[in-house]
Image: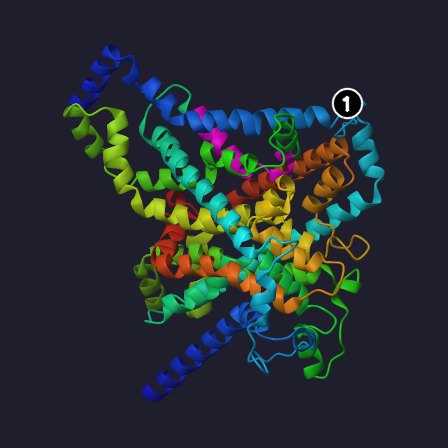
Amino acid sequence: MREKKLIRKIVYHVLVILFGIAMVYPVMWMISGSFKDNAEILRGTLALIPREPKMTNYATGWKGFGGTTFATFFKNSFIVSSIATFGCVLSSSLVAYALSRIRFRGRGFWFTCMLATMMLPTQVIMIPQYLIYYRLGMVPGYVPLILPYFCGQAFFIYQMMQFMQGIPRELDEAAEIDGCSKYRIYSQIILPLLKPSIVTTIIIQFYWKWDDYMGPLLYLSRPQSYTASIAIKLFADSASVTDYGAMFAMSTLSLIPVFLIFLVFNRYLVQGIGTSGLKG
Amino acid sequence: MSTAAVAVKKNSFRKFMNSNNTVGHVFAFPFIFGFICFSLIPIIMSLYYSFTDFSLGSKQAEFIGFANFIKLFQDEVFGKSILKTLQYVAISVPLKLAFALLVAFVLTRPTRMVTLYRSLYYVPSLVGGSVAVALVWKQLFARRGLFNSLLTGVGLQKINWFGNESLAIYPLILMAVWQFGSSMIIFAAGLKEIPPEYYEAAEIDGANGPAKFFRITLPCLSPIILYNLIMQTISAFMTFTQAFIITAGGPNNATMLYALEVYNQAFKYNKMGYACAMSWIMLIVMSIITLAIFKTSRLWVFSESDEG
């Protein structure tokens, strides 16, 4: 009986691990590809260990295109993602506070509007948005990639509202009796207590923005302003033979921030998604 | 009325700035501003443009009534793109949710490794939206790519994945299913909420594994299934990057997902009015499907109130 249980346990773990390896295999294959030469990648071998590992792909990839190196592309990505994420956290927490804690006229209406934007397909507003920015002379430029994030992101507003429901209202009430204004209640009581939800937002928003392709595709046109996602795609677009090694090398580098964030905040992320729900 | 509420009321008379109406609007201002500028006005503009022949650079958009919509229904690519998108959504979403639920269920066993396993299964969701992984995917399904090596390895014929009209969509579907991680985590959180007493009671009544799964787990999770189903359906309809990078819509428009076709019409062919009309059809189709899911949910979503 005990033996049977042990065998079942081993089988369970082996299966789960094997399947897990199959799941991350494409990513590992990409990383190993960054150390292989083109010929070896194109042979389509399953092996993860390169025949003769080499770092040259990183050197050639880093050179980038037309004199702009990947240092610039990564810097651009980082600036856009950081500012957008900051804006998203700030604005979403403000709006979430209003919608979940303050009884003002029109609250229900704006709450419904917020839910509606969550379900609105991007494609419907993408074209007119582009035209608005275009007429304001903001295309090409970073403003369209950043500005909307300072207006609250419905998905995160909703998530923060859910979290705020767990913060006892007695805290607000006690502070109010002590003469605290709503503005101070937000900044000194709610905001500090909202930290777990804020961390989740930072992680998810940052890597969504870091990975974003459509935004930069629409709004950036000068190579010096390209973000990493656009630049990586350029490898595949080049007229001559695609340098897969260099492409995978830069792809690997582009995933490092995402993995770092994931490793550091893993616990928060799993909790945050679990309690609020997450698409993607 | 509590003393606090009285205090709030007094305060609101005294100071306009501290009245709930003012405070509420101040805090909600970013959203109200954003909603009007980046959602409401664009929606209205889009509706207007869908009845015009507007294109970037043309001086005046001319009102052409329903011409765009009539043209759409004669457009072969449009028809194909709708069908392919529906196929993509109808296959990828249920498979993704089934996998997510299955893995979440398997990983509920209380072992120390569970967190590690969940992280492992979450990795595809973490990186799946990136250009980098899309480019890898393209390579995996190339003629001499990894999947064909696997096929020849077990003695099967190579498949020209991206050259075959009926097969080209499947690498994209597989990629979507591969990213079941975030749904899995939501399911896992839901599974934790099911009271263990339910299972204990069922065991006493002699229920076996499958019976417990179908009679307890599924009904208890149904609200979460509904949430995941709707969110995943919406995001599947909007899939763009993967199709744009992996297949660019080919071969012969066999993977022309709707979002990609809207993008092409607007920004490649500069037919803005036409693309707006297309996006409105998308909105209508998506609304109908979401509504249908909500309507049928009464039949299969089990809510706390009728548990009794």
Image side of residue A217 versus residue B188, left or right = right
Q: Position of residue A96 (x, y in %)?
A: 37, 34
Estimate the x, y position of residue A6 in percent, counting from the top left.
36, 84
Is residue A226 visible from the viewing direction of this image? yes
Main SS of residues in magenta: helix
Residue B214 seen in render = no
Q: Is residue A121 magenta?
A: yes
A233 sits left or right of A251 in the view = right
* Residue shown at the point (49%, 71%) measured from the top left: A20
**In the rendered view, how is the structure colored?**
rainbow
Disc 1 designates what residue?
Answer: B61
Label 1, secondary structure: give it.
loop
Q: Nearer the viewer, residue A229 or A95?
A: A229
Q: Say what amino acid the circle numbered 1 marks.
A: Ala
Q: Assess whether residue B207 is covered by the magenta stretch.
A: no
- Point 74% across, 43% down: residue: B264
Q: Quadrant of the N terminus of chain A?
A: bottom left
Residue A105 placed where, x, y %?
A: 39, 19
Residue at 42% over, 70% down: B208
**What span is in magenta?**
A108-126
What is the chain identity of the residue bearing mark 1? B
Residue A150 drawn above or below residue A271: above
Horizontal side of A135 relative to B209 (left or right) equals right
